[in-house]
Image (spheres, rainbow, N blue to C red):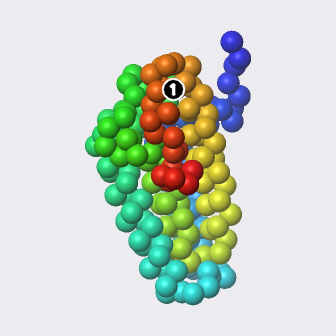
Amino acid sequence: MKKDSLFDKYLLAKPNIRMVIEWPILIAIGIIGTIFSLQTIPFSPISNIVGVVFLIVGFSIHRSSHRTHKQAHKQSEKIQKLATDGIYSKIRHPGYLSLILIYFGFMFAWGIVWISVPVVIFAVLTVLTAIREEEMLRNRFGQEYEEYTSHVPWRFIPKIF
């Protein structure tokens, strides 16, 4: 059996652990950017409003995913049951979609250009987490997961991705 790399361990870490690392980075860049008046994203305040909308939608999706899947904040290996109801009947990773929306919400709401670098990195890491988690779920749940993916083919956005 292949030993997980540090990168794999980070991808499959308990979501609260990742949040303790990622969110302070975004918040710190936002605060530093505000204090030092760093370059802002064009079309402010419209971009700021878009950011707030992304944050609201992201937190709403996150809440909805947790109502359906009570184990969503557990480490991937500790998930005991597939969530296939509610929002999980439309997309396979609503919790991860919500995080991506929240990351971009931070970026647009704060309006600091430099925050886009970690936002894109964290969004890519979140997509990689979903892909890596699917491998683990496929190994763990086998045919049950295959049937689920055939009924719900979309990871994040129905009819798109």
Neighbours of disc 1 within 10 Å: few (<14), some (14-19), many (20+): some
Q: Of 89 and 101, which appears nearest the observer?
A: 89
Q: Quadrant of residue 35?
A: bottom right
Residue found at x 38% / y 24% = 81
Residue at screen point 69% across, 19% down: 3
Picture layout, residue 140 above or below residue 91: above
Q: Position of residue 60 (x, y in %)?
A: 34, 58
Q: Position of residue 45 (x, y in %)?
A: 49, 87
- Residue drawn at point x = 56 percent, y = 40 percent: 130
Task: Give the residue pinned by disc 1.
Answer: 146
Q: Is residue 17 visible?
A: no
The amino acid at mark 1 is Glu
105 shown above or below 37: above
Left/right placement of residue 143 relative to residue 126 reads left
Q: Determine whether 22 is above or below 42 in the image.
A: above
Q: Is residue 96 visible?
A: yes
- The answer to which image quadrant residue 39 occupies is bottom right
